[in-house]
Image: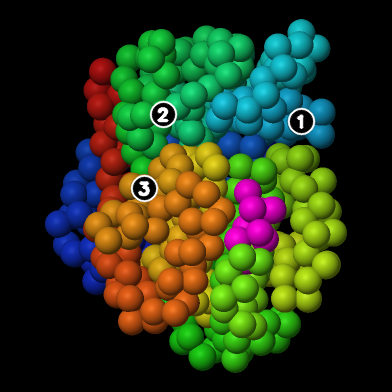
Amino acid sequence: MLNKVSVGIRDLQKYRLVVGNELIDEIEKLADELKGIRLCHINSSSFGGGVAELLSSYIPLVRSAGLTMDWQVIHGDRRFFTVTKSIHNALQGGDGSLIRQEKAQKRYKTQNQMNAREMDYNYDVFIINDPQPAALRHFSDDRHAKWIWRCHIDTSEPDKGAWAFLRPYVEQHDAAIFTMAQFIPSDLRVSEIATMAPAIDAFSAKNMSLPRALCREMTDNLGIDRNRPLIVQVSRFDPWKDPFGVMKIYQLAREKVAGLQLALVGSLASDDPEGWGLYAAIHTEADKDRDIHVFTNLTGVGSMQVNAFQTACDVAIQKSIREGFGLVVSEALWKCIPVVAGNAGGIPMQMTGNLTDYLVDTLEECAEKVVHLLENRELATELGKEGKQNVTRNFLMPRLIRDELSLVKRVLER
Protein backbone atom coordinates (compact mmCIF):
# COMPACT_ATOMS: atom_id res chain seq x y z
CA MET A 1 0.00 0.00 0.00
CA LEU A 2 1.07 3.59 -0.54
CA ASN A 3 2.24 5.41 2.57
CA LYS A 4 -0.37 7.53 4.33
CA VAL A 5 0.83 10.68 6.07
CA SER A 6 -0.52 11.26 9.57
CA VAL A 7 -1.40 14.93 10.02
CA GLY A 8 -4.16 15.07 12.66
CA ILE A 9 -6.78 17.81 12.92
CA ARG A 10 -6.36 21.59 13.28
CA ASP A 11 -8.95 24.14 14.45
CA LEU A 12 -10.41 26.04 11.50
CA GLN A 13 -12.45 28.22 13.85
CA LYS A 14 -9.31 30.15 14.87
CA TYR A 15 -9.41 31.79 11.46
CA ARG A 16 -12.61 33.65 12.30
CA LEU A 17 -10.40 36.18 14.10
CA VAL A 18 -8.32 36.69 10.94
CA VAL A 19 -10.61 36.37 7.91
CA GLY A 20 -14.00 37.02 9.52
CA ASN A 21 -17.11 34.87 9.86
CA GLU A 22 -18.48 34.93 6.32
CA LEU A 23 -15.74 32.82 4.74
CA ILE A 24 -15.71 30.25 7.57
CA ASP A 25 -19.50 30.00 7.43
CA GLU A 26 -19.27 29.39 3.68
CA ILE A 27 -16.76 26.57 4.25
CA GLU A 28 -18.99 24.98 6.88
CA LYS A 29 -21.94 25.07 4.48
CA LEU A 30 -19.87 23.39 1.76
CA ALA A 31 -18.61 20.79 4.23
CA ASP A 32 -22.18 20.03 5.27
CA GLU A 33 -23.19 19.58 1.63
CA LEU A 34 -20.23 17.22 1.11
CA LYS A 35 -20.77 15.29 4.33
CA GLY A 36 -19.93 11.61 3.91
CA ILE A 37 -17.68 12.24 0.91
CA ARG A 38 -14.17 10.80 1.28
CA LEU A 39 -11.32 12.80 -0.27
CA CYS A 40 -7.65 12.00 -0.75
CA HIS A 41 -4.67 14.06 -1.90
CA ILE A 42 -1.78 12.23 -3.56
CA ASN A 43 1.71 13.59 -4.19
CA SER A 44 5.32 12.41 -4.32
CA SER A 45 6.87 13.57 -1.02
CA SER A 46 5.76 14.09 2.56
CA PHE A 47 8.42 16.73 3.29
CA GLY A 48 10.78 19.25 1.75
CA GLY A 49 8.63 20.80 -0.99
CA GLY A 50 5.90 23.39 -1.23
CA VAL A 51 3.15 20.86 -1.94
CA ALA A 52 4.02 18.78 1.12
CA GLU A 53 4.11 21.89 3.26
CA LEU A 54 0.76 23.05 1.94
CA LEU A 55 -0.94 19.67 2.49
CA SER A 56 0.42 19.32 6.04
CA SER A 57 -1.68 22.34 7.06
CA TYR A 58 -4.50 22.11 4.54
CA ILE A 59 -5.70 18.58 5.30
CA PRO A 60 -5.97 19.02 9.11
CA LEU A 61 -8.04 22.18 8.57
CA VAL A 62 -10.38 20.43 6.12
CA ARG A 63 -10.82 17.63 8.67
CA SER A 64 -11.73 20.27 11.25
CA ALA A 65 -14.72 21.16 9.06
CA GLY A 66 -16.00 17.59 9.50
CA LEU A 67 -14.83 16.05 6.22
CA THR A 68 -12.78 12.90 5.68
CA MET A 69 -9.56 13.75 3.86
CA ASP A 70 -6.37 11.69 3.74
CA TRP A 71 -2.94 11.98 2.11
CA GLN A 72 -1.16 9.21 0.21
CA VAL A 73 2.43 9.45 -1.07
CA ILE A 74 3.65 7.49 -4.10
CA HIS A 75 6.81 5.36 -4.10
CA GLY A 76 9.75 5.94 -6.42
CA ASP A 77 13.49 5.43 -6.68
CA ARG A 78 16.16 7.89 -7.76
CA ARG A 79 15.80 6.93 -11.43
CA PHE A 80 12.06 7.60 -11.40
CA PHE A 81 12.44 10.94 -9.64
CA THR A 82 15.21 11.94 -12.04
CA VAL A 83 12.68 11.44 -14.84
CA THR A 84 9.91 13.33 -13.02
CA LYS A 85 12.23 16.23 -12.16
CA SER A 86 13.08 16.36 -15.85
CA ILE A 87 9.35 16.58 -16.64
CA HIS A 88 8.96 19.29 -13.99
CA ASN A 89 11.78 21.34 -15.49
CA ALA A 90 10.60 20.79 -19.06
CA LEU A 91 7.05 21.91 -18.23
CA GLN A 92 8.58 25.15 -16.95
CA GLY A 93 10.39 25.64 -20.25
CA GLY A 94 13.58 23.70 -19.53
CA ASP A 95 15.28 20.91 -21.46
CA GLY A 96 12.82 18.16 -22.36
CA SER A 97 15.24 15.77 -24.05
CA LEU A 98 15.18 13.13 -21.29
CA ILE A 99 11.43 12.57 -21.31
CA ARG A 100 11.52 12.15 -25.09
CA GLN A 101 13.57 8.99 -24.56
CA GLU A 102 11.59 5.76 -24.68
CA LYS A 103 13.46 4.38 -21.66
CA ALA A 104 12.49 7.39 -19.50
CA GLN A 105 8.87 7.24 -20.63
CA LYS A 106 8.73 3.53 -19.80
CA ARG A 107 10.17 4.15 -16.33
CA TYR A 108 7.55 6.84 -15.65
CA LYS A 109 4.68 4.64 -16.81
CA THR A 110 5.92 1.52 -15.01
CA GLN A 111 6.31 3.31 -11.69
CA ASN A 112 2.87 4.92 -11.94
CA GLN A 113 1.38 1.53 -12.78
CA MET A 114 3.04 -0.01 -9.72
CA ASN A 115 1.79 2.83 -7.51
CA ALA A 116 -1.72 2.50 -8.93
CA ARG A 117 -1.78 -1.14 -7.77
CA GLU A 118 -0.87 -0.09 -4.23
CA MET A 119 -3.38 2.73 -3.79
CA ASP A 120 -6.18 2.70 -1.27
CA TYR A 121 -9.21 3.35 -3.48
CA ASN A 122 -11.75 3.79 -0.71
CA TYR A 123 -12.40 7.43 -1.65
CA ASP A 124 -14.89 9.43 -3.68
CA VAL A 125 -12.48 12.11 -4.89
CA PHE A 126 -8.73 11.99 -5.59
CA ILE A 127 -6.68 15.20 -5.98
CA ILE A 128 -3.44 14.35 -7.79
CA ASN A 129 -0.64 16.87 -7.32
CA ASP A 130 1.83 17.70 -10.10
CA PRO A 131 3.42 15.51 -12.81
CA GLN A 132 4.90 12.69 -10.69
CA PRO A 133 1.60 10.81 -10.06
CA ALA A 134 -0.32 12.20 -13.06
CA ALA A 135 -0.63 8.77 -14.73
CA LEU A 136 -2.26 7.05 -11.73
CA ARG A 137 -5.71 7.62 -13.19
CA HIS A 138 -4.67 5.92 -16.44
CA PHE A 139 -3.52 2.78 -14.64
CA SER A 140 -6.39 2.70 -12.16
CA ASP A 141 -9.31 0.32 -12.49
CA ASP A 142 -11.45 2.65 -10.37
CA ARG A 143 -14.64 3.82 -12.07
CA HIS A 144 -16.37 5.21 -9.02
CA ALA A 145 -14.27 8.15 -7.87
CA LYS A 146 -13.77 11.57 -9.43
CA TRP A 147 -10.19 12.57 -10.22
CA ILE A 148 -8.75 16.11 -10.15
CA TRP A 149 -5.23 17.01 -11.30
CA ARG A 150 -3.59 19.96 -9.53
CA CYS A 151 -0.62 21.64 -11.26
CA HIS A 152 1.55 23.72 -8.93
CA ILE A 153 4.17 24.81 -11.49
CA ASP A 154 4.42 27.41 -14.25
CA THR A 155 3.31 25.67 -17.45
CA SER A 156 2.88 28.85 -19.49
CA GLU A 157 5.67 27.89 -21.93
CA PRO A 158 6.18 24.12 -21.61
CA ASP A 159 8.55 22.05 -23.69
CA LYS A 160 6.27 20.70 -26.42
CA GLY A 161 7.56 17.14 -26.19
CA ALA A 162 7.17 16.92 -22.40
CA TRP A 163 3.66 18.34 -22.51
CA ALA A 164 2.67 16.05 -25.39
CA PHE A 165 3.77 13.09 -23.25
CA LEU A 166 1.92 14.22 -20.09
CA ARG A 167 -1.24 15.71 -21.62
CA PRO A 168 -3.07 12.42 -22.36
CA TYR A 169 -2.75 11.40 -18.71
CA VAL A 170 -4.00 14.78 -17.48
CA GLU A 171 -6.96 14.66 -19.83
CA GLN A 172 -8.24 11.47 -18.21
CA HIS A 173 -9.07 13.50 -15.08
CA ASP A 174 -12.48 15.01 -14.41
CA ALA A 175 -11.02 18.44 -13.68
CA ALA A 176 -7.70 20.26 -13.59
CA ILE A 177 -6.47 23.12 -11.40
CA PHE A 178 -3.83 25.70 -12.29
CA THR A 179 -2.56 28.60 -10.20
CA MET A 180 -3.42 31.19 -12.83
CA ALA A 181 -5.05 31.35 -16.27
CA GLN A 182 -1.71 32.03 -18.01
CA PHE A 183 -0.52 28.56 -16.97
CA ILE A 184 -3.32 26.66 -18.74
CA PRO A 185 -2.04 25.03 -21.97
CA SER A 186 -4.26 26.01 -24.89
CA ASP A 187 -4.66 22.43 -26.12
CA LEU A 188 -5.76 20.91 -22.80
CA ARG A 189 -9.17 19.24 -22.98
CA VAL A 190 -10.66 18.52 -19.55
CA SER A 191 -14.31 18.78 -18.49
CA GLU A 192 -13.55 21.57 -16.05
CA ILE A 193 -10.43 23.70 -15.63
CA ALA A 194 -10.19 25.92 -12.55
CA THR A 195 -7.68 28.53 -11.43
CA MET A 196 -6.78 28.51 -7.76
CA ALA A 197 -3.80 30.11 -5.99
CA PRO A 198 -2.12 28.24 -3.12
CA ALA A 199 -2.19 29.65 0.41
CA ILE A 200 -0.30 29.72 3.69
CA ASP A 201 -1.37 28.73 7.19
CA ALA A 202 -1.22 31.72 9.53
CA PHE A 203 -1.13 29.47 12.61
CA SER A 204 1.54 26.98 11.54
CA ALA A 205 4.96 26.91 13.19
CA LYS A 206 6.34 28.60 10.08
CA ASN A 207 3.92 31.52 10.16
CA MET A 208 2.77 32.00 13.75
CA SER A 209 3.61 35.34 15.31
CA LEU A 210 7.02 35.38 17.02
CA PRO A 211 8.73 38.38 18.70
CA ARG A 212 11.38 39.84 16.41
CA ALA A 213 13.85 40.02 19.32
CA LEU A 214 13.45 36.29 19.91
CA CYS A 215 13.95 35.59 16.19
CA ARG A 216 17.10 37.68 16.14
CA GLU A 217 18.37 35.67 19.07
CA MET A 218 17.56 32.40 17.30
CA THR A 219 19.40 33.43 14.14
CA ASP A 220 22.27 34.75 16.25
CA ASN A 221 22.62 31.26 17.72
CA LEU A 222 22.93 29.96 14.15
CA GLY A 223 25.84 32.26 13.37
CA ILE A 224 24.07 35.42 12.17
CA ASP A 225 25.18 38.72 13.71
CA ARG A 226 22.00 40.29 15.04
CA ASN A 227 23.57 43.77 14.93
CA ARG A 228 24.14 43.77 11.17
CA PRO A 229 21.60 43.85 8.31
CA LEU A 230 20.36 40.52 6.97
CA ILE A 231 18.75 39.52 3.69
CA VAL A 232 17.22 36.06 3.27
CA GLN A 233 16.04 33.79 0.49
CA VAL A 234 14.02 30.74 1.56
CA SER A 235 13.51 28.17 -1.19
CA ARG A 236 14.20 24.67 -2.43
CA PHE A 237 17.67 24.20 -3.87
CA ASP A 238 16.52 24.54 -7.44
CA PRO A 239 18.06 26.31 -10.47
CA TRP A 240 14.74 28.08 -11.08
CA LYS A 241 15.18 29.90 -7.74
CA ASP A 242 18.50 31.36 -9.02
CA PRO A 243 20.57 30.83 -5.84
CA PHE A 244 23.82 31.85 -7.53
CA GLY A 245 22.11 34.98 -8.76
CA VAL A 246 21.07 35.73 -5.18
CA MET A 247 24.69 35.49 -4.07
CA LYS A 248 25.64 37.96 -6.80
CA ILE A 249 22.83 40.28 -5.65
CA TYR A 250 24.22 40.15 -2.11
CA GLN A 251 27.70 41.01 -3.38
CA LEU A 252 26.39 44.00 -5.34
CA ALA A 253 24.31 45.24 -2.40
CA ARG A 254 27.17 44.83 0.05
CA GLU A 255 29.20 47.36 -1.93
CA LYS A 256 26.75 49.99 -0.64
CA VAL A 257 25.57 48.43 2.65
CA ALA A 258 28.48 47.66 4.96
CA GLY A 259 28.28 44.47 6.99
CA LEU A 260 25.41 42.97 4.99
CA GLN A 261 24.73 39.25 5.56
CA LEU A 262 22.94 36.69 3.38
CA ALA A 263 21.15 33.55 4.53
CA LEU A 264 20.09 30.95 1.97
CA VAL A 265 17.60 28.74 3.76
CA GLY A 266 16.69 25.74 1.66
CA SER A 267 15.06 22.35 1.75
CA LEU A 268 15.86 18.99 0.21
CA ALA A 269 13.03 16.67 -0.75
CA SER A 270 13.00 12.92 -1.40
CA ASP A 271 11.55 13.44 -4.89
CA ASP A 272 14.27 15.88 -6.04
CA PRO A 273 17.63 14.17 -6.72
CA GLU A 274 18.81 17.27 -8.61
CA GLY A 275 18.72 19.28 -5.38
CA TRP A 276 21.66 17.44 -3.80
CA GLY A 277 24.13 18.39 -6.49
CA LEU A 278 22.98 21.99 -6.47
CA TYR A 279 23.23 22.10 -2.67
CA ALA A 280 26.88 21.00 -2.86
CA ALA A 281 27.65 23.63 -5.50
CA ILE A 282 25.97 26.37 -3.45
CA HIS A 283 27.98 25.35 -0.40
CA THR A 284 31.23 25.51 -2.36
CA GLU A 285 30.45 29.04 -3.51
CA ALA A 286 29.16 30.22 -0.13
CA ASP A 287 32.31 29.03 1.63
CA LYS A 288 34.21 31.82 -0.15
CA ASP A 289 32.40 34.47 1.95
CA ARG A 290 31.97 34.15 5.72
CA ASP A 291 28.81 36.30 5.59
CA ILE A 292 26.96 33.96 3.25
CA HIS A 293 25.20 31.31 5.34
CA VAL A 294 23.50 28.17 3.99
CA PHE A 295 20.95 26.23 6.06
CA THR A 296 18.76 23.22 5.28
CA ASN A 297 15.99 21.10 6.73
CA LEU A 298 18.57 18.32 7.13
CA THR A 299 20.65 20.30 9.63
CA GLY A 300 17.95 21.15 12.13
CA VAL A 301 16.52 24.20 10.40
CA GLY A 302 12.81 23.40 10.38
CA SER A 303 9.63 25.43 10.18
CA MET A 304 10.23 27.40 13.38
CA GLN A 305 13.75 28.37 12.31
CA VAL A 306 12.49 29.44 8.87
CA ASN A 307 9.94 31.59 10.68
CA ALA A 308 12.77 33.12 12.69
CA PHE A 309 14.84 33.90 9.58
CA GLN A 310 11.88 35.49 7.80
CA THR A 311 10.91 37.54 10.85
CA ALA A 312 14.46 38.58 11.75
CA CYS A 313 15.60 39.62 8.27
CA ASP A 314 15.46 43.15 6.94
CA VAL A 315 14.53 42.22 3.37
CA ALA A 316 13.37 38.91 1.89
CA ILE A 317 14.40 37.94 -1.64
CA GLN A 318 12.74 35.51 -4.02
CA LYS A 319 14.72 35.84 -7.23
CA SER A 320 12.86 33.14 -9.13
CA ILE A 321 13.28 32.74 -12.87
CA ARG A 322 10.15 30.57 -13.11
CA GLU A 323 7.69 30.23 -10.27
CA GLY A 324 4.38 28.43 -9.94
CA PHE A 325 3.40 30.61 -7.00
CA GLY A 326 6.15 31.03 -4.42
CA LEU A 327 4.60 30.46 -0.99
CA VAL A 328 7.66 32.04 0.64
CA VAL A 329 6.64 35.45 -0.75
CA SER A 330 3.33 35.34 1.13
CA GLU A 331 5.11 33.95 4.18
CA ALA A 332 7.47 36.93 4.37
CA LEU A 333 4.74 39.47 3.62
CA TRP A 334 2.53 37.90 6.30
CA LYS A 335 5.32 38.77 8.74
CA CYS A 336 5.36 42.38 7.42
CA ILE A 337 8.77 41.86 5.82
CA PRO A 338 9.28 43.66 2.46
CA VAL A 339 10.09 41.41 -0.49
CA VAL A 340 12.14 41.95 -3.64
CA ALA A 341 11.23 39.20 -6.09
CA GLY A 342 11.57 37.99 -9.65
CA ASN A 343 8.78 39.12 -11.96
CA ALA A 344 7.85 35.51 -12.67
CA GLY A 345 4.84 33.22 -12.60
CA GLY A 346 2.57 33.57 -9.59
CA ILE A 347 4.74 36.06 -7.69
CA PRO A 348 3.06 39.21 -9.12
CA MET A 349 -0.28 37.95 -7.77
CA GLN A 350 1.13 38.42 -4.29
CA MET A 351 2.96 41.70 -4.88
CA THR A 352 0.29 44.18 -5.86
CA GLY A 353 -0.11 47.93 -5.31
CA ASN A 354 3.12 49.61 -4.26
CA LEU A 355 4.85 46.25 -4.03
CA THR A 356 4.91 45.96 -7.83
CA ASP A 357 7.84 48.39 -7.80
CA TYR A 358 9.88 45.58 -6.21
CA LEU A 359 9.30 43.00 -8.94
CA VAL A 360 12.60 42.72 -10.81
CA ASP A 361 14.02 41.20 -13.98
CA THR A 362 17.79 41.56 -13.50
CA LEU A 363 20.31 40.96 -10.74
CA GLU A 364 21.40 44.60 -10.83
CA GLU A 365 17.82 45.82 -10.45
CA CYS A 366 17.25 43.42 -7.57
CA ALA A 367 20.38 44.62 -5.76
CA GLU A 368 19.34 48.25 -6.27
CA LYS A 369 15.88 47.61 -4.79
CA VAL A 370 17.37 45.70 -1.83
CA VAL A 371 19.72 48.59 -1.04
CA HIS A 372 16.86 51.08 -1.33
CA LEU A 373 14.81 49.19 1.26
CA LEU A 374 17.77 48.72 3.59
CA GLU A 375 18.40 52.46 3.48
CA ASN A 376 14.74 53.48 3.82
CA ARG A 377 13.37 51.60 6.79
CA GLU A 378 10.08 53.52 7.07
CA LEU A 379 9.26 52.64 3.46
CA ALA A 380 10.20 49.01 4.12
CA THR A 381 7.83 48.93 7.08
CA GLU A 382 4.96 50.40 5.04
CA LEU A 383 5.48 47.92 2.22
CA GLY A 384 5.51 45.05 4.70
CA LYS A 385 2.18 46.17 6.14
CA GLU A 386 0.65 46.52 2.68
CA GLY A 387 1.86 43.05 1.79
CA LYS A 388 0.32 41.53 4.90
CA GLN A 389 -3.05 43.07 4.03
CA ASN A 390 -2.92 41.49 0.57
CA VAL A 391 -2.03 38.08 2.01
CA THR A 392 -4.84 38.35 4.57
CA ARG A 393 -7.38 39.06 1.83
CA ASN A 394 -6.23 36.51 -0.72
CA PHE A 395 -3.68 33.92 0.36
CA LEU A 396 -4.68 32.32 3.65
CA MET A 397 -5.86 28.71 3.97
CA PRO A 398 -9.62 29.28 4.36
CA ARG A 399 -9.85 30.85 0.89
CA LEU A 400 -8.08 27.83 -0.64
CA ILE A 401 -10.32 25.41 1.26
CA ARG A 402 -13.43 27.24 0.02
CA ASP A 403 -12.17 27.21 -3.58
CA GLU A 404 -11.22 23.52 -3.62
CA LEU A 405 -14.38 22.29 -1.88
CA SER A 406 -16.46 24.36 -4.31
CA LEU A 407 -14.74 22.62 -7.22
CA VAL A 408 -15.19 19.20 -5.61
CA LYS A 409 -18.91 19.93 -5.22
CA ARG A 410 -19.26 20.93 -8.89
CA VAL A 411 -17.37 17.85 -10.09
CA LEU A 412 -19.49 15.51 -7.97
CA GLU A 413 -22.72 17.13 -9.10
CA ARG A 414 -21.69 16.70 -12.72
Q: CA distance from mark 1 to mark 3?
A: 30 Å
Instruction: Compare marks 1 and 3 and give the one earlier in the sequence.
Output: 1
Instruction: Find disc 1 in the rendering and name its residue.
Output: 82
The residue labelled by disc 2 is 183
- Residue 246 appears anywhere in the view: yes
- How far across and down, in percent of the image, does residue 165 sit? 60, 12
Q: Please, what is the three-letter code of the amino acid marked with disc 1?
A: Thr
Task: Mark 2 or mark 3: name the one nearer the start of the chain.
Answer: 2
Vertical relation: 314 (above or below) 414? below
- In the image, taking residue 102 as reference, residue 341 lies left or right, namely left
- Is tag 1's residue or tag 2's residue first in the polypeptide sequence? 1
Locate residue 42, reporting x and y percent: 55, 35
In the image, residue 80 above or below residue 234: above
Q: Give the residues drawn in magenta, as a range.
A: 242-250
Q: Amino acid at mark 3?
A: Pro
What is the C-alpha distance between the residues marked 2 and 3? 14 Å
Residue at figure coordinates x 64%, y 53% from the top left: 245
Determine the image quadrant of residue 356. Answer: bottom left
Q: Residue at x 48, y 27 (%)?
A: 155
- Residues 285 and 166: in front is 285
Image vertical order of residue 283 relative to residue 128, above or below:
below
Observer-side mark, 2 or 3, equals: 3
**Alpha-carbon neighbours of circle 2 within 10 Å: few (<14), some, or many (≥20)?**
many
Task: Specify whether residue 246 is painted magenta.
Answer: yes
Between circles 1 and 2, the one closer to the viewer is 2
Look at the numbered disc 2 and give the secondary structure of its residue.
helix
The kind of residue on which mark 2 rests is Phe
**Mark 1 or mark 3: which is in front?**
3
Q: Is residue 33 magenta?
A: no
The tag on residue 348 is 3
